[in-house]
């Protein structure tokens, strides 16, 4: 189940795309959370592999990472995904340091052996993909690259060329976190990307509510929602509460499409 082919098929059938983010290892029931958000209408799921020095994460995801590390993550996070059988594609987000330490081929093959077909490495830019890009592709892992609002046009084209699965449009400069409103930069970067690529373009960072997701989807093919979901998990929402929130996002996006 490749991410890009799945998302393309959904998009081409007239749907806007929804990718929730779940911190791997957060609580003893985190695998049930992954299953729950899949059943609630996610088109794919992004799972954070915790690491000690997050670069993009704001206070909410940092706290989730801290708690997951105390519970033993990242050990066992990828292995646990092998038993999820979510029915939608899975991608992991983590630091390149974890990939480098494991070794490119070993890490990539561990992902696919456990049903994960995508990887997001925020600190590995397009010009430093090196051996990882082709090694991941041979193993069946799609490398999803990020495009910031300040990225110049020529670099955007390179990012789109080398990104697989989807192109991650960073909606606002700064760390992840909930915002009161969608930044204007989210729509601008999505529009710029859509003008140069047919790959699915999803806006992440700064999308917190169904209303903001609807607004982002006016230009983008879909959204990634992380901090708003993780905050609910930190507050004890559990699988049921996570599913309720994702259902709310799904209904809003579908309503906006109509």
Image (spheres, helix red, strand yellow):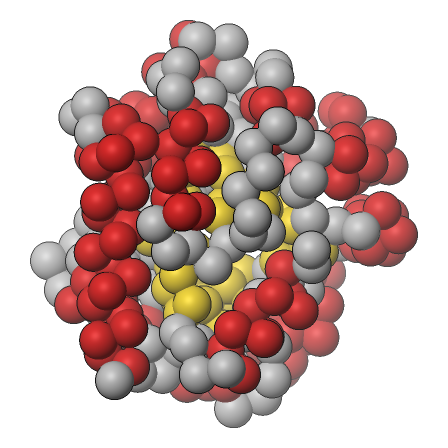
* As drawn, 100 above or below 9: above
Kindly identify the residue that appears in the image at 68 percent across and 40 percent down.
Answer: 115
Q: Nearer the viewer, residue 163 or 256?
A: 256
- Report which quarter residue 248 is drawn in: bottom left
* As drawn, 41 above or below 235: below
Image-based side of 13 in relation to 26, left or right? right
Kindly identify the residue that appears in the image at 53 percent across and 83 percent down.
Answer: 12
Q: Nearer the viewer, residue 200 or 115?
A: 115
Kindly identify the residue that appears in the image at 40 percent across and 14 percent down.
Answer: 28
For the view shown, which residue lies furthest in the left direction?
180
Q: Position of residue 93 (x, y in %)?
A: 55, 42
* As drawn, 45 above or below 25: below
Regarding residue 128, the answer to whether it shows in the image is no
Exactly how many numbered labels are in the figure?
Answer: 0
- Report which quarter residue 256 is drawn in: bottom left
Viewport quadrant of the N terminus:
bottom right
Viewport quadrant of the C terminus:
bottom left
For the view shown, which residue lies furthest in the bottom direction?
195
């Amino acid at each position: 189940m490749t991410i890009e082919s799945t998302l393309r098929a959904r998009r081409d059938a007239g749907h806007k795309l929804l990718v929730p983010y779940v911190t791997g290892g957060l609580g003893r029931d985190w695998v049930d959370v992954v299953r729950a958000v899949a059943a609630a209408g996610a088109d794919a799921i992004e799972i954070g592999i915790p690491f000690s020095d997050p670069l993009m994460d704001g206070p909410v995801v940092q706290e989730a990472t801290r708690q997951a590390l105390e519970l033993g993550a990242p050990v066992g996070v990828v292995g646990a995904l092998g038993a999820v059988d979510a029915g939608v594609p899975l991608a992991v987000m983590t630091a390149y340091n974890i990939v480098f330490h494991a070794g490119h081929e070993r890490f990539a093959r561990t992902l696919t052996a456990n049903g994960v077909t995508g990887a997001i490495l925020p600190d590995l830019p397009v010009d430093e993909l090196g051996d990882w890009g082709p090694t991941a592709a041979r193993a069946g892992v799609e490398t999803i690259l990020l495009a910031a609002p300040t990225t110049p046009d020529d670099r955007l084209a390179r990012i789109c060329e080398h990104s697989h699965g989807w192109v991650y449009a960073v909606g606002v400069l700064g760390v992840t976190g909930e915002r009161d409103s969608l930044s204007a930069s989210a729509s601008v970067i999505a529009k710029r990307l859509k003008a140069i690529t047919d790959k699915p373009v999803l806006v992440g960072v700064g999308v917190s509510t169904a209303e903001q997701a609807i607004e982002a989807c006016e230009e983008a093919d879909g959204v990634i929602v992380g901090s708003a979901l993780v905050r609910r998990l930190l507050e004890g929402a559990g699988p049921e509460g996570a599913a309720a929130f994702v259902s709310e996002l799904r209904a809003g996006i579908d309503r906006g499409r109509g």
